[in-house]
Image (cartoon, rainbow, N blue to C red):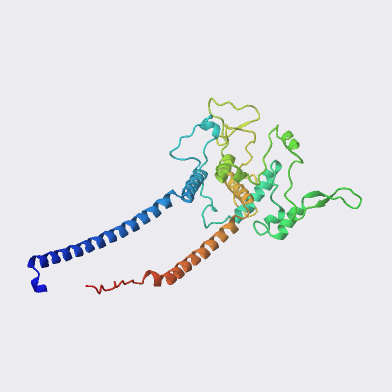
Amino acid sequence: MLSRLPVAALKSQSAIGASRSAFSALKARATSQVRFTSSSSASSAKLESLFTSRASLISAALFSAGSIAWYTHLYGSLPFVGEVHANSLADDGLHPTAYPWSHKGLFDSFDHSSIRRGFQVYQEVCAACHSLDRIAWRNLVGVSHTADEARLLAEDVEYTDGPDDKGEMFQRPGKLSDYLPSPYPNEEAARAGNSGALPPDLSLIIKARHGGADYVFSLLTGYIDPPAGVEIREGMNYNPYFPGGAISMARVLWDNLVEYEDGTPATTSQMAKDVVTFLNWAAEPEHDERKKMGIKAVILFSALFAVSIGVKRFKWTVIKNRKIFYNPPKDLNH
């Protein structure tokens, strides 16, 4: 029967078969292209959803706000945003010099000898007007004094206690649990004794003033005569580091004003440095312990992070390094 078919018919059948195979190849190519396109579109959709999701936007906003707040906390203002003030730079006070304090570094602790000398300066000079309400005698133990030394210091002060069995208040020697005494019984008495000015409590003075220890040190050592053209009213003193320049507190530190127990020369700058170190400790008694705990935490979490990376690599190395082979089924029709 095949011998009866013309040659043209055989040629047409072969052409139809070739066109079918070409169509199948084109269809397979189109299918693979659609698959790749769909996978790329899916990945782009995931990427787009990542950038447009509400959680991502909130996280980015919080990160930006936190970065700006931290920068302004450290440096005071942003470099690309201008500031408008109603007062002049003289009204804000002269900017203090940044001094290399011994406890300023990440791994540095307080100079406890300086704390002891600073407490002596506070007790003999500053305690006449300023209180230290947040510090008890027991806080000095192990920092600047031994327990016996702190107990003797506390017993030198009389404290009002009671009532007793008769319902009356009585005086007793101080104990380690008592807080350092205030020079005035109340705020009105403090103002009356200082021409209407209220001496601030020094417990948190380092934290309460912009510039911290640098500002307080500069203030204590920065008393000078007022320059030409600057008038200071009676009862006030000129200090360029104080906002406005006029301060009620007179200069209180002079050379050899106190006699240190360890023989350190009691210069004005030495006394100012010691009392500022003591006040810095008073505002932050946990300073040394906090840094020690921070170092321990960094070491611990670094080790845990390294262990977690190793465990992750161990668990995922089988999955990430496997090879997938695909053997398509053979078409038995050809």
Residue nearer the viewer, 236 or 190: 190
Q: How many numbered discs sit on the rendered protein? A: 0
Q: Is residue 162 shown above or below 13?
A: above
Quarter of the image with the N terminus in it: bottom left
Q: Nearer the viewer, residue 293 or 179?
A: 293
Quarter holding residue 290:
bottom right
Q: Residue at x 44, y 71 (%)?
A: 315
Can you give x and y, in whole percent of width and height, for residue 259 in the image? Answer: 65, 49
> Residue at horizontal 17%, vertical 66%?
17
- Name the image quarter holding residue 310: bottom left
In the visual, does 27 lie left or right of 120? Answer: left
Task: Name the quadrant of the C terminus.
Answer: bottom left
Expressed as whole percent of the image width and height from the top left, the position of residue 277 reads: 59, 50
263 or 191, nearer to the observer: 191
Left/right of residue 102 with respect to residue 283 in the rendered view: left
Q: Is residue 237 above or below residue 38?
A: above
Residue in the image at 59% along x and 55% along y = 287
Left or right for 224, reference 170: left
- Image-quadrant location for residue 137: bottom right
Foreground pick, 26 / 111: 26
Instruction: Locate residue 266, reporting x and y percent.
Output: 61, 47
Which residue is located at x 49 percent, y 67 percent?
A: 303
User: Looking at the image, can residue 125 be seen?
Assistant: no
Residue 300 percent coordinates (x, y): 53, 65
**Residue 163 shows in the view:** yes
